[in-house]
Image (tube, rainbow, N blue to C red):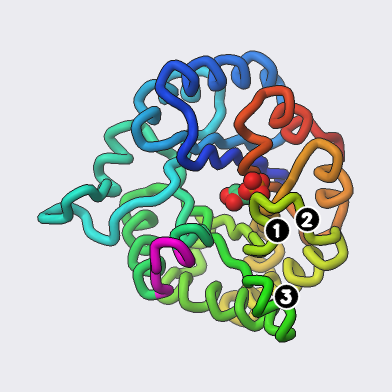
């Protein structure tokens, strides 16, 4: 039985006081929540919300990290620095990293392996652009990103990996994939995990959906067989929109 996993990706929003205040509000309102919850503030606010997360049981996430452990990488953040701050999980391969900052599958795979080596959990994001969907390549793109991102990851290490299917055309656009469309890709991701690992592993992996998730559509999405949670952007920036998503009743 998979546990629902609702994560908030704050992207490049929130000053330190704003982040602290939202984290406190969420900690209060999500007390006793049955689902697994994570928030990923910007790097600058990780330290400020770490203690609040620890006390409340909300997992602390980072939005990215460097491919290397240390060295001459001006402006980068290392896995060791994230560990220092008490980070539990790192989002890797987000479409904004892939398409705006040109991250390649090989970079993402390096990061996945490094994060797992150091005991961080990983949310690996995959998903197609509108052009790719219209060309009938939605399943192929997600499969390829999945296979490349997980190269060298053992079945045992997969316990620490969550997959997030985020169709690029649905991110920040207000367009959500229909529950059926999302479920089709999620089912294919699970089938791919079965090919790569085993049936039992595939059945145990949490697959989140991301792309314009809001209180009004969360339940319909989560009811689908292969949707096990959400990676929420815009709606995670306010307690009044994130809390109802996090508390949805299956
Ligand atoms: P939105 O919920 O704003 O569409 O963002 C989704 C996302 O990119 C989460 O990582």
Pointer 1 local density, CA inside 10 Å: few below 14, some 14–19, many at least 20 = some
Pointer 3 local density, CA inside 10 Å: few below 14, some 14–19, many at least 20 = some
- Residue 170, disc: 1
**Which residue corresponds to mark 2?**
176
The residues tagged by marks 3 and 1 sit, at their Cα atoms, a distance apart of: 19 Å
Closest to the camera, between mark 3 and mark 2, is: 2
The picture quadrant where one finds residue 16 is top left
**Which residue corresponds to mark 3?**
188
Provide the secondary structure element on which disc 2 rests. loop
Q: Give the mark, 2 or 1, whose residue is nearer the N terminus.
A: 1
Relative depth, front residue between 158 and 80: 80
Q: Give the mark, 3 or 1, whose residue is nearer the N terminus.
A: 1
* Residue 93 visible in the shown view: yes
The residues tagged by marks 3 and 2 sit, at their Cα atoms, a distance apart of: 19 Å
Q: Are marks 2 and 1 in contact (CB under 8 Å)?
A: yes
Q: Position of residue 18 (x, y in %)?
A: 49, 19
Q: Position of residue 34 (x, y in %)?
A: 73, 31
Q: Is mark 1 within 8 Å of ligand 1?
A: yes
Chain part drawn in magenta: 98-105
* Residue that appears at 69% across and 47% down: 230
Give the number of callouts. Answer: 3
């Amino acid at each position: 039985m998979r546990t629902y996993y609702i994560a908030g990706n704050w992207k490049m929003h929130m000053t330190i006081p704003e982040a602290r205040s939202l984290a406190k509000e969420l900690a209060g309102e999500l007390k006793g929540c049955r689902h697994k919850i994570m928030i990923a503030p910007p790097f600058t606010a990780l330290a400020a919300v770490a203690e609040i997360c620890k006390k409340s049981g909300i997992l602390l996430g980072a939005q990215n990290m460097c491919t290397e452990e240390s060295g001459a990488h001006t402006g980068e953040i290392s896995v060791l620095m994230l560990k220092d701050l008490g980070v539990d999980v790192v989002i890797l391969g987000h479409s904004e990293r892939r398409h705006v900052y040109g991250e390649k599958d090989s970079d993402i795979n390096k990061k996945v392996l490094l994060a797992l080596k150091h005991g961080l959990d990983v949310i690996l994001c995959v998903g197609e652009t509108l052009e790719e969907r219209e060309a009938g390549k939605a399943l192929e793109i997600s499969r390829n990103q999945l296979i490349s991102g997980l190269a060298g990851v053992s079945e045992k290490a997969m316990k620490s990996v969550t997959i997030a299917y985020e169709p690029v055309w649905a991110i920040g656009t207000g367009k959500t994939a229909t529950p059926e469309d999302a479920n089709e890709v999620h089912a294919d991701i699970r089938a791919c995990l079965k090919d790569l690992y085993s049936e039992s592993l595939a059945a145990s992996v949490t697959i989140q959906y991301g792309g314009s998730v809001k209180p009004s559509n969360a339940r319909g999405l989560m009811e689908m067989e292969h949707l096990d949670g959400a990676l929420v952007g815009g709606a995670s920036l306010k307690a009044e929109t994130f809390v109802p998503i996090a508390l949805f009743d299956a």
